Structures are given as structure tokens and as C-alpha cells.
Amino acid sequence: MAHPLSRRDFLRHSLLAAAALSLAPLDALALGNKPFVRKGPPKKVIVIGAGPAGLSAAYELVQVGHDVTILEARTRPGGRVYTIREPFSDGMYAEAGAARIPPNHGLTLAYIKRFNLSLDPVYPATLSFVSSNQSKRSELTWKGYASAVERAVGIDLGRDSQRWFKIRGGSDLLPKAFAARLTEKILYGSPVVKIAHDARSVRVTFSQAGSYQTLTGEHLICAIPFALLRRIEVSPPFSPKKRQAIQDMTYASVARVFLQVRKRYWLEKGVNGFAVTDDPMEIWHPTFNQPGKRGILLSYTRQHYAQRITAMKESERITHMLGQMEKLFPGIRQHCEGGVTKCWDEDEWTRGAWAEGSWWQLKKIAQPEGRVHLAGDHLSSASSWMQGAFESGQRVAHEINDAP
């Protein structure tokens, strides 16, 4: 059965969350603490992509009176912020994309505060973690587990298991909060096929319900991965260096396999459901602080291992991961009720997880091309994080607001 938080633990978590939120610039969401006040008459802005970068840029521009339209290929907001709720039972959910929030990601925490969302710890403070190194299974304290994660995937989790946060109710509540305030500004199911721009305007052609339509504006924000942008016709073409960067950008392969169990049986054995292996692979128990007896274990694989899983059929992915999980949490076969997978390489509107490249190399590429502005976590100092997407959203919002 699940181990409920004691009142002392609950208060401790609440205080930690409050401390994290206090790091954020809550008086004004502005890049470099620069006040965001509209300059001149309202501008007509088109945004491609309703992920965190596009949504936050649109939100800030709308807040000061600009006229914004967002074109989103999917029928949901969020992009790679994607919480899976179906086909899980009992209201359980797990993250297929963005999940963890470090305490120093001030913009992310500030938006969470602004939209009255709550935080929970990502990792439990009790029971043992599991590690597998060269097929040798070990049970670890937080310190040992954090060191193993850093060796395996290069993420420094720090000394305290309670320093990392997640959004209570699911990460997708954050993009949904933006979208709720931009409802009439978003056109879903509207993939862009052509961008035309000149010294005076931008024109975007997109497909919706089987027909092509065109929007005209004064500025354009491209807040989509380069893997998608290079499929869009741009007239006139971007500068040679920008075209080369867009063409050469590679994206990390990530696969997640989610297994639902009828009982969180591993708790009875003194382990909390979190593990790391040298494949490399992380195992998370995202339901440790969700109610109910059922639970979810998810595997988080990267690069070559993720590509192997992506090449399998759905049923093969689940069978394979059951075998891997059995080594870490013996007994899962008899408790598993089914599973689902998410492989980002095969996502039509992403074609990968996060961009692989140096921010310092891309910094010049992030500069506007006339009236076209590029945004996304790949064009920030925090690539692969929501924080990076929000940073870039702030940047392009200021570029457009400050433009003559």
C-alpha cells in the first residue's frame, strides 16, 4: 500500500515549495527584470507553435495589448509538455515529457505561481532507491542514487531529494493555464506549410480541415523545433548560417514505457519505486504521491537504447520493459495490468525530444530575421527544460514589443 505523508512531512514539503517560489521574480515576468510595457500601437503577431515558448510569448504580448494568433498543428497545447492520463485507471497520470523542475528555474516557478498551481516533490523522502550497474542490483540512499543518476545521464540531483519539484495534477496544467487565457487566440489542427516575409509584413499559409488559409501580420514567432521548421517553405530563405543551423540540428531520442500495476508491491519490500541503470535508464514511480492502491512505473531511456525501443512494436516495448523491470522490482509480471509507450522520435510534430547543440553556437542564430523571430528551449541557456522555453518566449516578446 502507499505510504501517506505525515503532517510533519507535509508541512516540510509545503515550506520547501514556498521557498522555491520565492526565488521567482513575481512582481514582473520580464527578461532581465526589464519592465514589460507596450511601446507604440498594438502589433499584429502570428505565433507558430503552442508549446511553452509560443504560449508564454503570446501571453506576455496579449497582456500588454498586442493582437496575437497562435497556429498549432496538434489539437492540444503544450508540445513536449505532455501528461498521459489515458488509459490509466483510478485517475492516475504520468509525464511523457517535461516533468522535473529544479529550484533555480525562476521563470517556470513564477508562471506556476501566477496561475495558482501547486508543487509536489518529484522524489520521495523515504525508503530505498535501486541501482543496477553491470547487472548487479543494489539498494541505495538518496546520496548513492543521486550519484548513480549523475553518472548515468549527467543530471546533478543534489544532496536533498526534496529539492526537485513537479506540478501537482500534471505538468500539462501549466500549458493548459496559458491556453485558457488565450482560448480565442489559438487555432488548433493548423500545421504551417509556408512562411513569406518582407520589410513590411509576414504571411503564413497553413492547413486546416483539408483546406489552405493565409494569415498576414506584422511579426512572426516560430516556436517549433528545427526538425519541423526545415519542412516549411520560407520565402525569401533565411540567411545561409541560419538555414545551415536549422538543417543540421539533431534531436535526442527518448522513449518512455509506462506500466500500470494493481498494487504498489515494492513498497512492502522497502523500496520506493525509483531506480537507475547503466543502460542508461531511469525508472520513476510518478504515483508515489497520488492516491490509491494501483501505481505506475515508467522507464525513461535515451539515445541508442531509446532508438531500440522505438523500433519495436508497442506490445514488444511493454514485454521488453517488463523483463527489465523484473530485475529491479521483482514481482511486476504478476501485478502488471497493462502498459502504454511514448517514443518522441515518432511524434509527427516533434521528431525528437530536445535539441543537441551549444547555446553559445546558436545565440547568433536566435537573432530575428527581419520580422521573423525564433523561439524554443533550443535557443536558450536552458535547453530541454521548460525554463529554456520560457526564457526564449520572454526574449521574442521583448524583441517584438521593442520593435519600431
Image (spheres, helix red, strand yellow):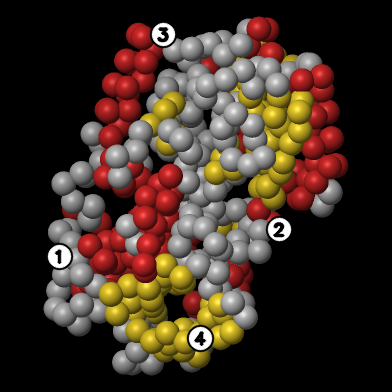
Q: Secondary structure at mark 3?
A: loop
Identify the residue shown where x is 32% and y is 28%.
Answer: 17
Is residue 81 visible in the rendered structure shown here? Answer: yes
Q: Which residue is under mark 1?
A: 37
Answer above or below: position of 168 versus 353. above
The 10 Å Cα crowd at callout 4, few under 14, some 14 to 19, many 20 or more, is: few
Is residue 375 visible in the rendered structure shown here? Answer: no
State if disc 4 and disc 2 touch (CB < 8 Å). no
Locate the C terminus by quadrant.
bottom left
Q: CA distance from mark 3 to mark 2?
A: 42 Å
State if disc 3 and disc 1 touch (CB < 8 Å). no
In this rendered view, identify the residue nearer to me: 270 or 243.
270
- Could you say where residue 306 lies in the image, as x and y percent from the top left? 73, 46
Q: Which residue is under mark 4?
A: 213
Q: CA distance from mark 4 to mark 3?
A: 57 Å
Q: Which residue is under mark 2?
A: 346
In this rendered view, identify the residue nearer to me: 335 or 100.
335
Identify the residue shown where x is 36% and y is 67%.
Answer: 184
Comparing marks 4 and 3, which lies closer to the viewer?
A: 4
Comparing marks 2 and 4, which lies closer to the viewer?
A: 4
Disc 4 marks a residue whose amino acid type is Gln
State if disc 3 and disc 4 touch (CB < 8 Å). no
The tag earlier along the polypeptide, 1 or 2, is 1
Q: Which residue is under mark 3?
A: 6
Is 253 situated left or right of 24 in this image?
A: right
The tag earlier along the polypeptide, 1 or 3, is 3
